[in-house]
Image (cartoon, rainbow, N blue to C red):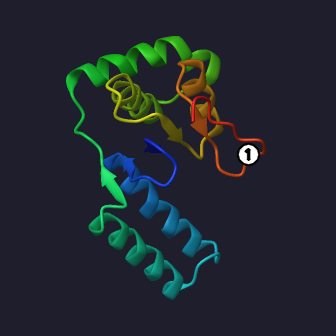
Amino acid sequence: MRLVDQPGSTSLISRLVLVEIESVFATKFRTGELDAVGQQACQRRLRADLSQGRIQIGPPIHEHHYSSARKLIIQFGSSMALGTLDALQLAIALDLKQAGIVSVMVVADHRLGQVAELCGFPTIIPGTPCTVIPGL
């Protein structure tokens, strides 16, 4: 999940996304989609994006985020299969949206995107046709 204020602006990601990105790199290497050189290039690019400020790490998790995530699980866990970590990320994203810090959420997980949309959070799911960002 990545949060953006406007197209072309700095992306804001959670600390959890950093772990997820490394997991994706490892999976791509393991499945042969990346060789060792490609994996290292991806890792270097990520480090460069972080050091140049193109990607920034979001705020720490607070108690109210856990409470909000729990409410999201109660509301969407059974019907939409919203999981723990996705609920926590969405709770933080919704908090940042309410504060006017971000306006769009980019997700690779279709379920998370659907739940975000139901919560009034415009999303972009890469590879999905006809992506429309309301209000931009």
Q: Residue 55 appears at what percent x and percent y?
A: 36, 57
Question: Quick one: 32 or 104, which is closer to the camera?
Answer: 104
| Rendered position, 68 above or below 59 | above
Residue 4 found in image quarter:
top left
**Residue sitting nearer the eye, 119 or 75:** 119
Q: Residue furthest front?
A: 136
Along the viewing direction, whichever of 11 and 109 lies nearer the viewer: 11
- Horizontal arrangement in the rendering, residue 128 relative to residue 85 (left or right): right
Q: Secondary structure at mark 1?
A: loop
Residue 85 vs residue 4, the one in the foreground: 4
Q: Quadrant of residue 14?
A: top left
Residue at 30% x, 68% y: name it: 52
Left or right: 130 with respect to 31?
right
Q: Residue at x 58, y 29 (%)?
A: 135
Residue drawn at x 64%, y 78% is 32
Q: As drawn, is 96 to the left or to the right of 108?
A: left
Task: Quickly name the residue at label 1.
Answer: 128
Expressed as whole percent of the image width and height from the top left, the position of residue 112 reads 57, 33
Q: Residue at 27% across / 68% down in the picture?
A: 51
In the image, what residue type sits under mark 1? Answer: Thr
Please identify the residue farthest to the bottom as the structure is shown. 37
On screen, residue 1 versus residue 98, left or right, reads: right
Q: Quadrant of the C terminus?
A: top right
- The image shows a total of numbered marks equal to 1
Q: Relative to residue 42, is residue 130 depicted above or below?
A: above
* Percent coordinates x, y for residue 60 in the rendering: 22, 38
When the figure is inspected, residue 57 is found, relative to residue 104, above or below; the finding is: below
